[in-house]
Amino acid sequence: MADVFAGVRLLGPPVTDGEYIALSEHETVHLHEYTRIYAVPGLYEHVVQDRLRCTSPQVAVAGFLRAAASLGLEPGSMTVLDVGAGTGLVGELVRHAGVARVVGVDALPAAREASLRDRPGVYADYVVGDFLLGDGLREALRPYAFGGLVSAGAFGGTHATPRALENALAILPPGAPVAFTIDERWMDASDPDGFGAAVERLIADRRLELLERTRFQHRVTTTGEPIFYQLVVGRTAPVPAD
């Protein structure tokens, strides 16, 4: 596989608009131009997992499994929701850990296509949708009795918003284990519109019971600087009665 991508070069990051990769002498794409990158089998994993040493999928899945174990839950009996499923790496890791069924959700049709192409059979279902849009996605997920949620890098920045996180957690039953990773730049609780404030609201409103909150190195940039994320692990909790 390395020989297939021998000509791929990492560029940037320019100060203005982020990181790029040169696919060939004639084509350069932004690192987050997912539709183009997903179109090439294995390219996303080569660049992000191998070259940029991304650890979020492994960290998120390990956190989820710790939460499930601490709650006395058996993975083999669970249906887990994978938010921002991408090419399916998180789903694959969760299944290898013994989880019975995984349902993926991603806003990009190209992500679903890549996952079904590269990791057939990992997901019981893979739904294209956005948790900000509400009813349509909720209806598509209604047949599944989810027992937990895992997400690696799907929230924050140009990805899903704090409202999407709240909507995703809302479809889980009380006591379900959850684990998600978010860039620490978006976790400043002093920003009322940021993820830090959203997580604090979820905890204060008893919609989320925090079990762990850990800083870790998510990956490096295309020029080698570390990027740090936070792992948030918890379980859904019932909203108190009025």
Image: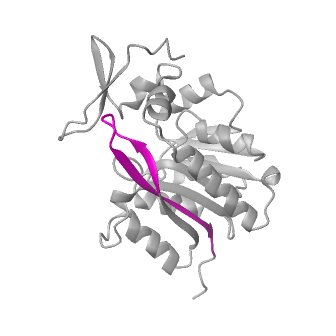
Is 31 or 163 nearer to us in this picture?
31
User: Which percent across, then down, holds residue 165?
Assistant: 48, 59
**232 lies above or below 80:** below
Residue drawn at x 62%, y 69% is 236
Of residues 174 and 183, the one nearer the viewer is: 183
> Looking at the magenta stretch, what is its main secondary structure?
strand
Of the pair 46 and 26, the residue shown nearer to us: 46
User: Where is residue 13 shown, x and y percent of the image?
Assistant: 25, 36
- 42 relative to 140 in the view: left or right: left
| 229 is within the stretch colored magenta | yes
Residue 49 sits inside the magenta stretch:
no
97 to 206, vertically: above or below: above
Q: Quadrant of residue 26?
A: top left
Q: Which residues are magenta?
A: 216-237
Question: Which quadrant is home to the N terminus?
Answer: top right
Residue occupying image coordinates x 39% and y 67% = 196
